[in-house]
Amino acid sequence: MLFTLWKWPAWKALPVLAVFFIVDIAYFGANLIKVPEGGWVPLAIGLIIFTLLTTWSRGRKLMQQEMADGAMPIPVFVKSAANSATRVPGTAVFMTSSADGVPHALLHNLKHNKVLHERDHPADDQGRRRAVRARGKSLRRSRIWGRDSTA
């Protein structure tokens, strides 16, 4: 941060960093002797939580990749299922994290209920700005992107 964001020269930043490293090493050394007498418990709990969260994150990425690889292209869906399915009154919104393909929730709804709503609205909820494109008979894709710059 000192070098990249604030653009401090090395001769100015290194003494400041050295002070912080000396204090951190002193605290680390003082607390290191507490590990055998029970200090290992919070370290073990932290390691378990870290393992759970990294496993969850990796599994989620793998699952999203697998779902993206097997996604049905929208033109294929519009030509086949969207035009032949029974329509029921109402609007359905199907959220997805991928901008490509038909949302899996929409496919599951069609598979189990064997109906589509009059206005199905697949949405890609990623932020604030929005673009809507028609994708067949009363089927639209709304893409929301960007972040609110006022926050």
Image (tube, rainbow, N blue to C red):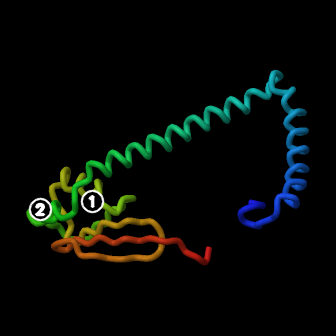
Residue 4 lies left or right of residue 18; in this view the side is left
Residue 71 horizontal/vertical position (percent) = 26, 53
Residue at numbered disc 1: 101
Q: Earlier in the sequence, mark 2 or mark 1?
A: 2
Quadrant in the picture for the C terminus: bottom right
Between label 2 and label 1, give the one nearer the viewer. Answer: 1
44, above or below 92, in the image: above
Amino acid type of the residue tagged 2 in the rendering: Ala
Amino acid type of the residue tagged 1 in the rendering: Gly
Residue 120 horizontal/vertical position (percent) = 25, 68
Q: Give the number of the disc on residue 122.
A: none
119, above or below 47, in the image: below
- Callouts 2 and 1 close, C-beta under 8 Å: no
- The answer to which quarter of the image holds residue 149 is bottom right
- Secondary structure, mark 2, is loop
Residues packed near mark 1 inside 10 Å, few (<14), some (14 to 19) or many (20 plus)? some
Residue 116 horizontal/vertical position (percent) = 19, 63
Residue 21 horizontal/vertical position (percent) = 86, 45
Residue at numbered disc 2: 85
Q: Residue at x 16, y 73 (%)?
A: 137
